[in-house]
Image: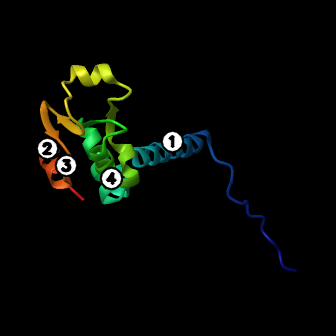
């Protein structure tokens, strides 16, 4: 007759010290995941934009302003150069903001102003690039 010895199985429940270790590991993983999410290099808006849109956004970010009017044909030409991306340009409509345009000494439109420098008339992208140091499309 064969005899079987009763062997005790190892305990599967964890001790309180093991629970703390698991908790600490989970907290550390959460902290690392948060830091990676926060500090991982992200694609900036200008990297995801078309070159013309990035140029327009850069002009505004640098503080370049275009002053113009709705009835000015040269202003319409300038706006057309940017196409739909003109909405990214900081634009002051002198038909609406006459006081601001007068205070800025706007005598003709379009006028581009950046750091006290002025460019009057329709400007090429290279001219605006020289003014602002933004990369022309």
Q: Determine the residue positioned at 77% across, 68% down.
A: 5
Q: Residue furthest right?
A: 1
Which of the numbered marks, if any, corresponds to residue 131? 2
Label 3 or label 2, whichever lies nearer to me, is 3
> Which SS class for mark 4?
helix
Label 1 or label 2, whichever lies nearer to me, is 2
Label 4 or label 2, whichever lies nearer to me, is 4
Query: Does 66 appear above or below 10?
Result: above
N-terminal label among 4 and 3: 4
Q: Position of residue 37 (x, y in %)?
A: 43, 48
- Residue identifier under label 4: 82
User: Tags 3 and 2 in contact by the CB under 8 Å rule?
Assistant: yes
N-terminal label among 4 and 2: 4
CA gap, disc 4 and disc 3: 11 Å
User: Tags 4 and 3 in contact by the CB under 8 Å rule?
Assistant: no
CA gap, disc 3 and disc 2: 10 Å
Residues packed near mark 1 inside 10 Å, few (<14), some (14 to 19) or many (20 plus) = few
Query: Does 90 appear above or below 49?
Result: above
Q: Position of residue 25 (x, y in %)?
A: 50, 46
Q: Determine the residue positioned at 55% across, 46% down.
A: 22
Which of the numbered marks, if any, corresponds to residue 123? 3
Q: Is residue 89 left or right of residue 113?
A: right
Let me know if residue 131 appears in the view: yes
Q: Residue furthest bottom?
A: 1
């Amino acid at each position: 007759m064969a005899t079987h010895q009763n062997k005790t199985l190892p305990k599967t429940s964890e001790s309180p010290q093991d629970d703390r270790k698991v908790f600490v590991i989970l907290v550390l993983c959460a902290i690392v995941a948060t830091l990676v999410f926060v500090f991982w290099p992200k694609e900036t808006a200008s990297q995801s934009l078309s070159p013309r849109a990035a140029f327009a956004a850069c002009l505004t970010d640098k503080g370049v302003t275009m002053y113009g009017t709705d009835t000015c044909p040269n202003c319409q030409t300038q706006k057309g150069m940017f196409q739909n991306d003109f909405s990214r340009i900081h634009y002051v409509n002198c038909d609406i903001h006459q006081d601001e345009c007068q205070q800025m000494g706007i005598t003709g439109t379009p006028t581009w102003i950046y750091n006290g420098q002025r460019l009057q008339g329709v400007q090429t992208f290279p001219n605006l690039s020289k003014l602002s140091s933004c990369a022309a499309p």
